[in-house]
Amino acid sequence: MTGIIGSDQLRAYSTTIRDALSRHTAKHLSPDTRKSDKPMRRFSVKETAEALRVNYSSLRHYAKIIEGFPSGKLEAGNRRTFSGEEVHAIQDLLFQARKIPLSMYPRKEPGDVTAKLAVYNLKGGVAKTSLSANLAEFLGLRGFRCLIIDLDPQASLSDLFDVRADAQLDDGDEAVHSIYDILKYDDPVPITDVIQATYFPNIDIVPGSMNMTEFEYETSASYMNGTQQSQPWHRKISNALRLVEEYYDIILFDTPPHMSFAVIAAVASATGLLVPVSAGMLDVVSLEKFLDLGAGTLEVVESVEKDKRYDFIRFVLTRYNPNDQAQLQLSSFLRAQLGDAMLQADFLQSTAIGDGTNTMQPLLEVGPAGVTRKTYDRIFDSLQKIAHEVEAEVMKSWGREQKSQRDN
Ligand SMILES: Nc1ncnc2c1ncn2[C@@H]1O[C@H](COP(=O)(O)OP(=O)(O)OP(=O)(O)O)[C@@H](O)[C@H]1O
Ligand SMILES: [Mg+2]
């Protein structure tokens, strides 16, 4: 028989690409071989002030007068830098010393509900994953304890944080569990055994994996053979999260570009929706269809969860290039139609994001040294403003009103 054996050929290509990628990563992160072994970068005093939303000179003053203020590390050029953990220790000190009001303190108080945010749009490539990763890092550095949940079988978010649930294991390695292990019908694994800390302070992850597709088959099968389940599938995510919610201020779901039972369960569990939209004509047309389909899905959820309510549903323009006339027009159109539901800040198109650097690093990991200063500042400002607007929504849900988006 002649012809190509598809499975052999695809597996061989997969191996070739995987090996080449790991050589690329190893070279880039040399002398460390894995991203997670690389020490997290440190933050300047200016960056620390920005993350804590404290005035720069006030922060320098507090460093002198507050006992126990971390001394950080003195770098070349007499520049002081802090680790992410030190940034958070400073935040706690300032809060205790009443230099940071509760309205600006990114931690739940007793009685506050963890904000669960689904980044949701069925359109592919609208920057759901890039937004989830960057938002998580801005919110994490800001001081929110974040759990990110990767619902996409492609598991790009997990890749970005260098966590591989599907990876082939060497002898003696412990299996890395994924979201599928939490949701599966036979012998589910408790979420506490699945969550992993990432190298980024304040960010833990529930990894995604290819076998998430099995959850879809299992759920359909349970319908077809009428198996009675102890819990309905749409509550599986909320129920699993109950075990750990108290440890997190924000839980963020990155969703795949296709409808699935898992996505509906995440949306059913969320307290807020963030819909990324790109400023292309086809994107806007598909947005209309997505919203209609989304409304239908929510109706199904609401028919069984009568009290289901969201704290917020907001849209954000992504991969946006305001110098492109067509995009500019579409963004005005969207703003005119959606009004305040659109975030004021846009996620700008930038060479510093994702593929631009060929290193798959979120911006805060690239750092100002990785690109030109102007490029970095522009995209930093865009992402920081988005994070501030999301923060304001979360604070509002905790009954804390912030004076303005920029009250430094
Ligand atoms: N602001 C940006 N500037 C430049 N490139 C971007 C930006 N945001 C995303 N990208 C790039 O666009 C592509 C799609 O982004 P991403 O994977 O985040 O989208 P997605 O919505 O998660 O896609 P999918 O639907 O496949 O999950 C990636 O190559 C990413 O690096
Ligand atoms: Mg994605």
Image (spheres, grey):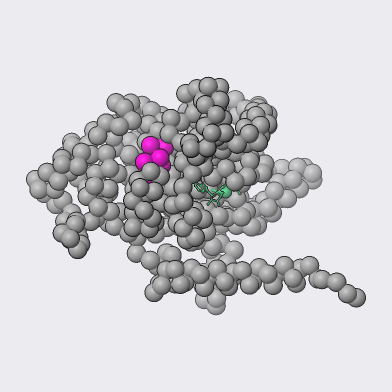
Provide the residue span drawn in magenta: 380-387
The residue lying at 60 percent from left, 29 percent from top is 305
The residue lying at 78 percent from left, 67 percent from top is 6
Residue 120 in the figure: left or right of residue 30: right
Percent position of residue 31, x then y: 39, 74
- Judge whether residue 96 can be spotted in this image: no
Percent position of residue 24, x then y: 51, 70
User: Of 326 and 263, which appears nearest the observer?
Assistant: 326
Q: Does the magenta stretch include residue 381?
A: yes
Q: Which quadrant is home to the C terminus?
A: top left
The residue lying at 58 percent from left, 73 percent from top is 19
Residue 406 in the figure: left or right of residue 71: right
Q: For residue 295, which quarter of the picture?
A: top right
- Prevailing secondary structure class for the magenta stretch in the rendered image: helix
Instruction: Check the image and name the residue furthest to the left.
Output: 65
Q: Is residue 332 magenta?
A: no
User: Of 272 and 304, which appears nearest the observer?
Assistant: 272
User: Of 43 and 301, which appears nearest the observer?
Assistant: 43
Percent position of residue 292, x then y: 67, 28
Q: For residue 18, which quarter of the picture?
A: bottom right
Judge whether 345 appears above or below 156 on screen.
above
Instruction: Check the image and name the residue furthest to the bottom.
Output: 171
Percent position of residue 336, x then y: 53, 22
Residue 174 in the figure: left or right of residue 300: left
The residue lying at 17 percent from left, 43 percent from top is 59
Q: Which quadrant is home to the N terminus?
A: bottom right
- Judge whether residue 134 can be spotted in this image: yes
Please tell me how many numbered marks the rendered image carries.
Answer: 0
Q: For residue 166, which quarter of the picture?
A: bottom right
